[in-house]
Amino acid sequence: MSVKLVEFLRTKQIGENTFRGKSRDLGTPQVYGGQVLGQAIHAAQMTIEERSIHSAHAYFLRRGDFNQHIDYQVERSRDGGSFSARRVEAIQHGRPIFNLSASFQKTEDGMEYAEKFEMPPGPDEIEVSQEELDSINLRSNILFDSAFSIRPVKVSRLKENAKIQFWIQTEEKLPDDEPTQRAVLAYISDFGLLAAATIPHGYMPRVQIKKTKRKLMMASIDHAIWFHRPLRMDEWHLFSTSPVSTSGARGLAQGRMFNQAGQLVTSTAQEGLMRQLV
């Protein structure tokens, strides 16, 4: 299953700086944002050697059509002594649907620090029934034919401490190269992130709390991701998401991913449309 996911995220070069990615109906009204993010990062990485992505900032401009392939045009903005910059535009039907700016760095040693974080019980300590998984609809098509294993930890509904946490890993071993690992992480980083911003308002990811019956229209506007440390997505990682702000029919959520040793490997943030429908 994981092999199919890796093949899906890999883009094919069709020109000097143009790459093509496949699309797939994952049960969402449009192309899943994590797909475009992961493929765009892979396309940018194809133009760089011996440097790994450390940050990316993206905007979702239009709905993607999952019945049509996506072409990624890469602009080689800069190649310096230690860093490289790339800009990627995703095109469908002759129009841009997404753009991304990314920075890549040669591996080097430096100072080490990360904010302390209270880790929840590990994945082996959590028993999750199929009924529980189905109740929060975590086994969706976005998980790509069960390419991932998930252990839900907690959904806190308290406004002052709202959060969603789950352990996640791929079912099968992934290739060892860092670009593939990071493309897979980028793919999953969009899964349920914006949903965290809805919790203080009485919503739950995929499931409404009885407190409110109002429907909510949601759409990603932008996405940012920072890669702090090496990672392996075929090993368990904790994804912890929480709301930051909601106003003006927009919501902002942040996410952090930790390995089982409690090391912070990735930070991410996303703003999206949150419009209540009567």
Image (cartoon, rainbow, N blue to C red):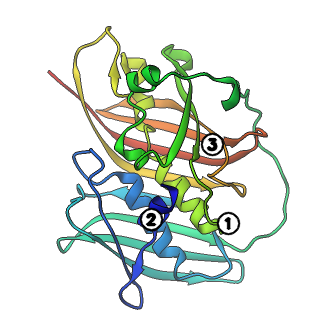
Is 66 situated above or below 273?
below
Q: Measure the alpha-carbon separation of dots 3 and 2.
A: 20 Å
Residue 16 position (above or below residue 278): below
Q: Contact, CB < 8 Å: mark 3 with mark 2?
A: no
Q: Which amino acid does label 3 sit on?
A: Met
| Residue 51 x %, y % | 66, 75
Could you tell me the amino acid type at mark 1? Asp
Q: Mark 1 points at which residue?
A: 176
**Does label 3 or label 2 sit earlier along the sequence?**
2
Q: Distance between the residues labelled 1 and 2?
A: 15 Å
Query: In the rendered image, which residue does mark 2 sit on?
Result: 9
- Determine crowd level at label 1: few under 14, some 14-19, many 20+ residues with C-alpha closer than 10 A: few
Q: Where 51 sits versus 251, above or below?
A: below
Instruction: Tell me the SS state at disc 2.
Output: helix
Q: Indicate left or right for 145 with 261 as reference.
A: left
**Foreground residue, 79 or 43?**
43
Closer to us: mark 3 or mark 1? 1
